[in-house]
Image: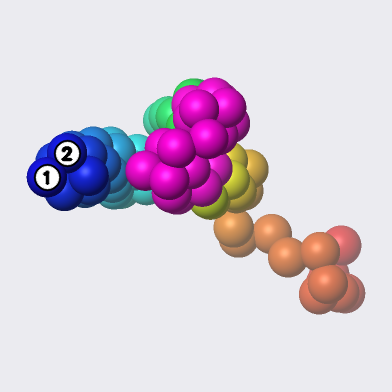
């Protein structure tokens, strides 16, 4: 019964983390970059700390948090102005 409650709490925590993830990704511009980077670093740090406990529930939650953190960091590194393409040659300039 305790294992079921632990998985239930893990599921609830992951739902809350995903809500923060969805909110950060839905922002626009520099606000999106800042929020995604900060939340990504926090999720990655929490995920790495969760791996220390060596409990199945913590390891699963830690790996999910690490993956969400890396994805958020990648969203935070995305360019703001996507009108300039490096691989296209403009003869007018």
Q: Nearer the viewer, residue 37 or 6?
A: 6
Is there CB contact under 8 Å for labels 1 and 2? yes
Which dot marks residue 64?
Answer: none
Name the residue furthest front: 1
Mainly helix, strand or loop, the magenta region?
helix
What is the span of residues highlighted in magenta in the rendered image?
A: 44-66
Question: Residue 10's image quarter?
Answer: top left
Is residue 57 inside the magenta stretch?
A: yes
Residue 7 placed where, x, y %? 23, 47
The span from disc 1 to disc 2 (Cα, nearest Å) is 4 Å
Residue shown at 81% from the left, 75% from the top:
88
Residue 62 placed where, x, y %? 48, 40
What residue is disc 2 on? 2
Which dot marks residue 1?
Answer: 1
Is residue 58 inside the magenta stretch?
A: yes
Residue 17 placed where, x, y %? 29, 39
Question: Residue 2's image quarter?
Answer: top left
Q: Nearer the viewer, residue 38 or 6?
A: 6
From what the image shows, is residue 65 above or below residue 42? below
């Amino acid at each position: 019964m305790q294992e079921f409650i632990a998985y239930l709490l893990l599921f609830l925590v992951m739902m809350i983390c995903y809500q923060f993830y969805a909110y950060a990704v839905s922002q626009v511009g520099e606000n999106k970059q800042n929020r995604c980077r900060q939340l990504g670093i926090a999720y990655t740090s929490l995920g790495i700390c969760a791996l220390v406990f060596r409990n199945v529930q913590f390891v699963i939650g830690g790996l999910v948090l690490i993956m969400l953190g890396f994805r958020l960091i990648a969203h935070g590194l995305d360019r703001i102005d996507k009108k300039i393409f490096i691989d296209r040659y403009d003869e007018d300039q």
